[in-house]
Image (cartoon, helix red, strand yellow):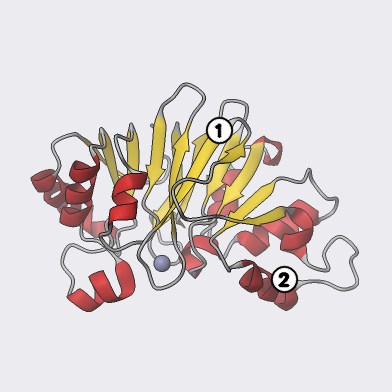
Amino acid sequence: MLDVLGCAATAPTPYGAASSYLVDVGDGVVLVDAGPGSLMAYAARYPLEALRGIVVTHLHADHSLDLMAWAYRWTFPRVLPRIPLFVPPGETARIAAFDALFGIPTLPTMHAPITQAWDVRELVLDGKREERIAGVSLRAFAARHAVPSAALRFTLPDGRVLAFSSDTGYCAPVVEAARNADLFVCEATYLEADASALEGHGHLTARMAGELATEAGAKHLVVSHLSDPEDGPQALADARDTFAGELSLAIPGLLL
Ligand SMILES: [Zn+2]
C-alpha cells in the first residue's frame, strides 16, 4: 500500500530523501511529494514507466523541489507518457514560474518542462471532489499550513484507505482526511514547539499526531517528517502516549 522513498523534513540527509512516498495502485504507483532526492530513490527501485501520477501536497521545497529533476527526466531525451500532476489550488502559477526558471528554449520538449511533462491539475480541498488516478480514488482536504497544503485520502480498489496529513497544524479537515483510515502518514515535525510554529506556521508535535490519529479513528499511524531524524524513538514514545493503535516510524524503504 505504501512505500516510503524519503521522509526528511528538510534537504536530503544521511537518512535519505526528503518527503516522497509511493502509493501502490496495483498496476503501478503514485508519487506523493517530490522532495529532494526522490527521483534518485525512486529510480533505484522502480522503472519510470510504473509511475501513474504525481500529487504534490504543497510547494515547500522539501516536498516539491525535485519536480524539476523529474520533469527533465520525463521530457528528455524523449517525452514519456503524459500522466497527471496534482498541485494545491492556485499553485499552477508557481509551477509556471518554476518552468520559466529552468525551461530550455532550444529544446522543443523542454521549453516548460513540468507543463510539457504532465497534465497539471489543481486539487479542490473540500474533501468531496473525487479525482481518479489509475483506478484509485483521491479526495483532498485543506490542511493548515503557511501555504496551500492538501491532506490526501486515497481509497484503493480493495477499499483500504491510505491518508496523508501533508504539513499541517491541528485542524478538523485533516481529521476528516484520516477518518477510519487503514494507514495514516502524519507529520510530526517537532517533539516540542511554541504556538507560532504549531499554529502560526502550521506543524504538529508527535504527541499531537497521535491525538489527531485517535480523533480520526485511524488504525495504523506512521509518524513522519521529523525535523531531527534522531528524534525517532522519542517521537514514537510521544505518539504512543496519545494513540493506542498500530504505530510506525517512517524511514526510507519502509513498506506497509
Ligand atoms: Zn511545509
C-alpha distance separating marks 2 and 1: 29 Å
Residue 255 can be seen in this image: no
* Residue type, label 1: Val
* Residue type, label 2: Asp
Q: Are marks 2 and 1 in contact (CB under 8 Å)?
A: no
> Which residue is at 76% across, 46% downward?
82
- Left or right of 141? Residue 42 is right
- Left or right of 245? Residue 224 is right
In depth, the one of 195 and 40 nearer the eye is 195
Q: Nearer the viewer, mark 2 or mark 1?
A: 1
Element at badge 1?
strand
Q: Is residue 136 above or below residue 242?
A: above
In the rendered image, which quarter contains the C terminus? top left
> Which residue is at 65% across, 55% downward?
121
Q: Is mark 2 within 8 Å of ligand 1?
A: no
Q: Report crowding for label 1: few under 14, some 14 to 19, many 20 or more residues within 10 A (C-alpha).
A: some
* Residue 141, x across and y down, in percent: 42, 53
Element at badge 2?
helix
* Quarter where residue 200 is shown: bottom left
* Residue 203, x across and y down, in percent: 29, 65
> Which residue is at 75% across, 61% downward?
115
Q: Report crowding for label 2: few under 14, some 14 to 19, many 20 or more residues within 10 A (C-alpha).
A: many
* Residue 100, x across and y down, in percent: 74, 76
* Residue 173, x across and y down, in percent: 34, 53
Q: What residue is pinned by disc 1? A: 136
Marks 2 and 1, the one that precedes in the sequence: 2
* Quarter where residue 47 is shown: top right
Figure quarter occupied by ligand 1: bottom left
In depth, the one of 124 and 133 nearer the eye is 124
Q: What residue is pinned by disc 2? A: 99
> Which residue is at 33% across, 41% downward?
184
